[in-house]
Amino acid sequence: MSTSGRRERVRERLGEEVGALFVTAPLNVRYLTGFTGSNGQLLLDAKPVFFTDGRYEEQSAAQVPDLERFVYSGTTKMSDILRRVLDERGIDSLGVEAAHTTIASLERLHEALEGVDLVRTSEVVEPVRARKDPAEIAAIRRAQSIAEEAVTSVLDTWDGGSEIELALALEWAIRTRGAEAVSFEVIVATGSHSALPHASPRRQAADLDEVLLIDIGAKADGYCSDMTRTYLGPRAPRALTDAHAAVCEALEAGCAAVRAGVKASDVDRAAREVLEAAGLADRFVHSTGHGVGLDIHEAPALTSTAEDVLEPGMVVTIEPGVYLPGVGGIRIEDLLVVTDDGAENLTTLDRGARLPGRDA
């Protein structure tokens, strides 16, 4: 879908409550305009206007050629230009993205736009972003492929080192395979350290004889991927072996539940019930999944209380986990795209428990 089509869908959601929407969240600006710089704003009404500063004059001309543009500098305030545009168009109510606007920024807008009613809006752009078009899905698919290649290549040749060194090797492999960045800081955790769901890699040696958890993602054309694999070594405790089997079963149940028209909370329940049956419900301490796109965590949320309903084009993770303090943790995560008749799993890396190249 073109950026103009995306803008039209957002305007339809905006309705008649406000005269225009002032978009300031960088990822929302990128989604609606194609601009990848660090400072840009969009006034979204029938004739959208793009704002940026002098650093991005040439970049914005190339990336946002279809919109009226205003470039401000130290002597020209963005708010003054915005005030003039609103006056010229007779706009007296302006929606602002409440989740992305600080109190200080809102106060400055109040001062600069005296007489304009500033309406705090929420979840106007994000639900539109949740449904990916074919080009977005292709970018996510590419990012996922890069991440999988990185994990496979590094583990095949890894000859020892610290958790941090393994994480850096994985990030290097991702970047050298064409990704523009990692989606988030790579998680590498071994031994009992893996019982921390969001463990930070340590400087101590990665002990691959017990358990190795890797949570990783690549970013391609701005879009993220997300995947977790947990491998067991020859000295893995029986509790982790059993937990790995249960998590695999929960993952399979969650993936099988993903299809258009299903409540996100029902997907969470499908995975959670498996771990309840295994007596591990209290060790599953986070949600079953989340949406992935320009941001690593975006709509929809797959939680027990979520009200979202899955729609074709949504890209979601399924990531059940079991965490045993003092022993270790198991998390296995796949990335799926919702289709008209079910879901396509974009993750192809084996879910097996054993680390490639190591004896059981």
Image (cartoon, rainbow, N blue to C red):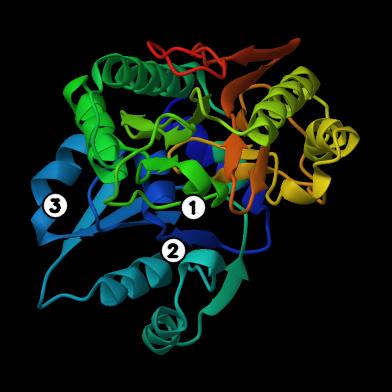
Question: Within 10 angstroms of label 3, few (less than 14), some, or many (20 or more) residues?
Answer: some
The answer for how far apart the CA atoms under marks 2 and 3 are is 26 Å
Is 255 situated above or below 211? above
Instruction: Give the structural element (helix, strand or loop) at label 1.
Output: loop
Q: Are marks 2 and 1 in contact (CB under 8 Å)?
A: yes
Is 209 situated above or below 343? below
Q: Residue shown at 45%/12% (left/top)?
A: 359
Instruction: Give the structural element (helix, strand or loop) at label 2.
Output: helix
**Residue type (three-letter) at the residue carrying disc 1:** Asp
Instruction: Give the structural element (helix, strand or loop) at label 3.
Output: helix
Q: Nearer the viewer, residue 317 or 206?
A: 206
Residue 296 in view here:
no
- On residue 56, which mark appears? 3
Q: Nearer the viewer, residue 314 or 302?
A: 302
Q: In this figure, which residue is indicated by the disc labeled 1?
A: 45
Q: Earlier in the sequence, mark 2 or mark 3?
A: 3
The answer for how far apart the CA atoms under marks 3 and 1 are is 23 Å
Q: Earlier in the sequence, mark 2 or mark 1?
A: 1
**Residue type (three-letter) at the residue carrying disc 3:** Tyr
Q: Nearer the viewer, residue 212 or 107?
A: 212
Q: Residue shown at 70%/32% (left/top)?
A: 243
Is 360 situated above or below 266? above
**Residue type (three-letter) at the residue carrying disc 2:** Arg
Q: Are marks 3 and 1 in contact (CB under 8 Å)?
A: no
- On residue 89, which mark appears? 2
Is 93 situated above or below 257? below
Picture coordinates of residue 282 (x, y %)?
Answer: 79, 51
Q: Single out the mark in the foreground, 2 or 1.
A: 1
Question: Within 10 angstroms of label 1, few (less than 14), some, or many (20 or more) residues?
Answer: many
